[in-house]
Image (cartoon, grey):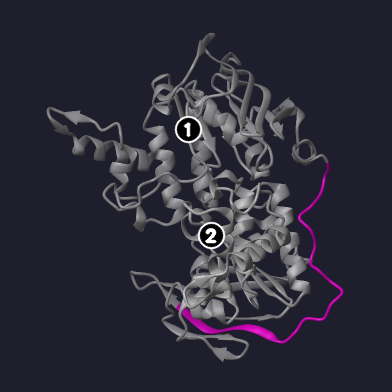
Amino acid sequence: MTSTSTSEVVLEARNVTKIYGSTHALKGVNFEIHRGQVTTLFGENGAGKSTLMKILSGVVTPTSGEIVLNGESKVFNSSTEARECGISIIHQELSLAPNMNVRDNIFMGREIMKGSGVDFAEEERITRELMAELEEDIDPLTPVEDLRLGQQQIVEIARALSVNARILIMDEPTSALSASEVEVLFKVIHDLTSKGVSIVYISHHLEEALEVTDHAVVLRDGVMTAYAKRSDIDLEWIVRNMVGEHFDLGSPPTGYAMGEVALTVENLVVKDSSGFNVVDNLSLEVQAGEIVCIYGLMGAGRTELMECIAGRMKPHSGRILLNGQDIAGLTISDRINNGLVLVPEDRQRDGLVQTMTVGENLSLASIGEFTRKLVTSPKREEELVNDSIRNVTVKTAGGEAAIGSLSGGNQQKVVIGKMLATNPEVVLLDEPSRGIDIGAKAEVFKLLAENAKKGLAVVYSTSEVGECLSVAHRIIVMHKGRISATFDSNVTKERIMAASGESLVA
């Protein structure tokens, strides 16, 4: 997305370092942002991308180094100070207040005053304009907790846009957006850069990021390893500089016989709050040792299917069988105890307890294994935690580390490890690679393949067509709540996308 604006440098990080205890998150990074252009920052989880962006936006202060804005050295002691200088950030993890409405979330902490009170009418008018700009039909008075994850992401973007920033940092802005919502966001980015706004764009969707970038920077282990203009890079260049080699996400595991049918879904119907069939007469069988991918666009019914099977939503009709036994009357806890677990789409809200340690999160679903008469065995819990950290290769200082100290990819491994620690027979994973880098994705899919060889039935959903063609033995495409096609692993991306009703061809 090349702009006609000049390539004047408006913001620089000069030899910036950031040290947390014994961890060097950034090691002398030099980084430039150009006026009216998009600088894309690539790197694996833990490479230092978010740390650098938090420094530029005033969320944290560097250990050493200098921030230069329009040629003047700056020290930002808060995000408010950075925002007053025209710098705003859309954080990777949503920071909305779910019990407040959309309007109040957008203007929280910087309300528009009229006389002695808040001008709610003006805030609502601006909110409606922002929603119209983002082509999203969201009422400003809707509670955020009533919105789906993609709509919450839109609200987060709208809040950043409402500041009228001159430098806008977007950290994983599309992780929960549908293809059509991504298109709208790219239009907004084009409009902003044409007006001289500078964008820093971070995304693990590499092909997507290439569509908007003018400059590409790669961070690896806290060091800037590569820089190039858009005309000089391609997907292979990004992957090579991120991870040091070109690799794919794996292939379906072979060399073993699949077992009996572990999960059966018969004529399942799930309705939303308005009575619409979000899952419409769907039937499915999954064998022990089989990996099944469910692909579909936002709104296809993937999440509702997963959550109904796991017990988080009630079916309107139809049956769900686990090893031939109807589980309709089982609670979520009972289903876990019987070998059916779900790794949810939103790991921050539904998969992790932020006030707990890595170990406490890992052992949470298996607490019955080391508890007798309300008394826990610390030794048995420690053994379980250490086994889980080793089995899912969590990069952490230990079980006592804060869960927030881990990268997104390692947090996702903790969620997966927590569920695998229950020794399940069927594991459901809703968008397991959301917000994690290509290296972490490969590790997650490798983990799924290894467990499938041991007899685990795996069902994972994705909205990224490339992830279908990794470890899945079978690919099921959903469209408007129904199965529109079933393929083996030899199918092309084009056929998968066509079956989903997607007009764009990769």
Judged from the image, the secondary structure of the residue bearing numbered disc 2 is: loop
Rate crowding at label 2 as few (under 14), some (14 to 19) or many (20 or more) other CA atoms within 10 Å.
Answer: many
Identify whether 231 is placed above or below 264: above
**Left or right: 405 in relation to 120:** right
Location of residue 373 in the rendering, given as x and y in whole percent from the top left corner: 48, 78
Question: Magenta stretch: residue 251 in it?
Answer: yes
Location of residue 309 in the rendering, given as x and y in whole percent from the top left corner: 52, 76
Q: Name the residue at 78% across, 41% down.
A: 243
**Left or right: 474 in relation to 355:** right
Q: What secondary structure is the magenta-colored segment mainly?
A: loop
Residue 1, visible in the rendered structure: no
Q: Amino acid at mark 1?
A: Ile
Identify whether 408 is placed above or below 253: above
Viewer-proximal residue among 281 and 313: 313
Which residue occupies the extreme right position in the image?
Answer: 255
Asked if the residue under mark 2 is in contact with the one under mark 1, i.e. CB atoms within 8 Å, the reply is no
Q: Earlier in the sequence, mark 1 or mark 2?
A: 1
Judged from the image, the secondary structure of the residue bearing numbered disc 1 is: strand
Region of the chain picked out in magenta, as a range: 245-269
- Which residue position is annotated with label 1? 89
Rate crowding at label 1 as few (under 14), some (14 to 19) or many (20 or more) other CA atoms within 10 Å.
Answer: many
Question: Magenta stretch: residue 497 in it?
Answer: no
- Which residue position is annotated with label 2? 345
Location of residue 458 in the rendering, given as x and y in whole percent from the top left corner: 67, 72
Q: Name the residue at 59% across, 51% down.
A: 400
Which residue occupies the extreme left position in the image?
Answer: 115
Give the image quarter of residue 405. Answer: top right
Location of residue 293 in the rendering, given as x and y in whole percent from the top left corner: 66, 67
**Left or right: 132 in relation to 37:** left
Q: Amino acid at mark 2?
A: Glu
